[in-house]
Amino acid sequence: MVALAATGRLYLNNVPTLRSFGRCPTRQPPFRVWSRMIEATIPVGSPEQIILLFGTADQHLRRIREAIPAKITTKNGRICLTGDEEAVLQATSIFEQMKVAVGREGALRPDQVSQIIAGVTGGKNGAAKAPELAIHQPGVSIRPRTEGQAVYVEAIRAHELVFCIGPAGTGKTYLAVATAVEAFKQKQIRKIVLVRPAVEAGESLGYLPGDLKEKINPYLRPLLDALSEMFDADYLKRLMTDEVIEVAPLAYMRGRTLNNAFVILDEAQNTTVSQMKMFLTRMGASSKMVVGGDTSQIDLPIATRSGLVDAVERLSVIDGIALVKLGKDDIVRHPLVGKIVRAYEEGSP
């Protein structure tokens, strides 16, 4: 919860700041701009959490101060922000996103903080004008972080079928799930179906113990992880029990018609041509499909053609279908991921 002075209410330290433009020695400035000063307070659970937010030797705090012209102090277990409205709102968004990340991962790396700052301020690799997705989950703020990701989200909103190809770490799965959750919460669709082919990544796992759910769970874990960040745990469990949200292997799609649904096929590079055709023809009335994959990580037998590669070649020119290609500049994981992708793209040593 952030305590923020709101327009029309009494402001603390409500001192207008005079900014002059075009000053010359012989006359007064041609115009003046008055900027309203506001304050916001962010409650923090403990001194240890403040240390995690500010970073070792305040390294995260320094990054934020370099990017945002707001005064940042602490008092009685709260972070206090003072400055003009835009600066305070940006700093508030940065600290709220950092609190969520700290709660999930603990200590943050400098590159994670830089990504959060860029996503809010529109710095390098940032998508400043990209709209925030309407997830409405406490402590969750999701928006595209790069121009490519912003194009991807807008393509999903505007088309009934979207293919997305890109390397690891570009947000193909996460943003697709987030956009599906947004559509569900806005009552645009009634059901979310998340699908993945059960293909082993170059290694034989052998016989998997347990019931059917336990056998397929390892393949579907990335989709479940994304969902768990966007729904309250009890509500998500209820939605999955009622099959409003369904996470299933690709083989279970045969023979179905999916109406009023948002359907996501993840790791689509590992489908065969016949599997891709089967999946795409499941689309029913008032439904939307997103198909994502990384064509540099195909785990099919060498002689088997990827259904994703085939579908893009066949279908991308059809009206109503969009193709989005994400690249190295859209990678938002650890900076080393981008360097690793570049090294492999450059060929064998």
Image (spheres, helix red, strand yellow):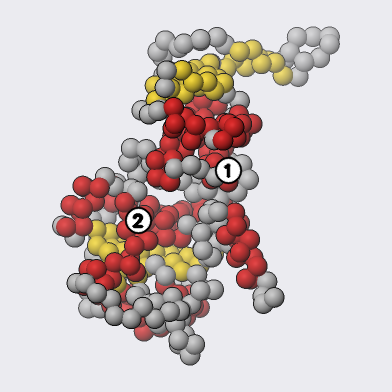
Provide the residue designation for mark 2: 225
Picture residue at 48% right of the left edge, 42% below the top: 107
Q: Mark on residue 346?
A: none
Picture residue at 53% right of the left edge, 32% below the top: 54
Q: Position of residue 312 (x, y in %)?
A: 48, 75
How much space separates mark 2 and mark 1, taking CA atoms? 23 Å
Q: Position of residue 241 (x, y in %)?
A: 16, 57
Question: Looking at the picture, which amino acid does disc 2 mark?
Answer: Asp
Q: Is residue 238 left or right of residue 105?
A: left
* Image height of 17 relative to 325, above or below: above
Q: Is residue 94 left or right of residue 247?
A: right
Q: Kindly report which numbered mark, 2 or 1, lies closer to the viewer in this rendering.
A: 1
Query: Which quadrant of the figure has residue 325?
Result: bottom right
Q: Is residue 191 visible?
A: no
Picture residue at 57% right of the left edge, 59% below the top: 337
Q: Foreground residue, 231 or 253?
A: 231
Q: Foreground residue, 4 or 7?
A: 4
- Few, some or many C-alpha atoms within 10 Å of disc 1 (few <14, some 14-19, many ≥20)? some
Provide the residue designation for mark 1: 110
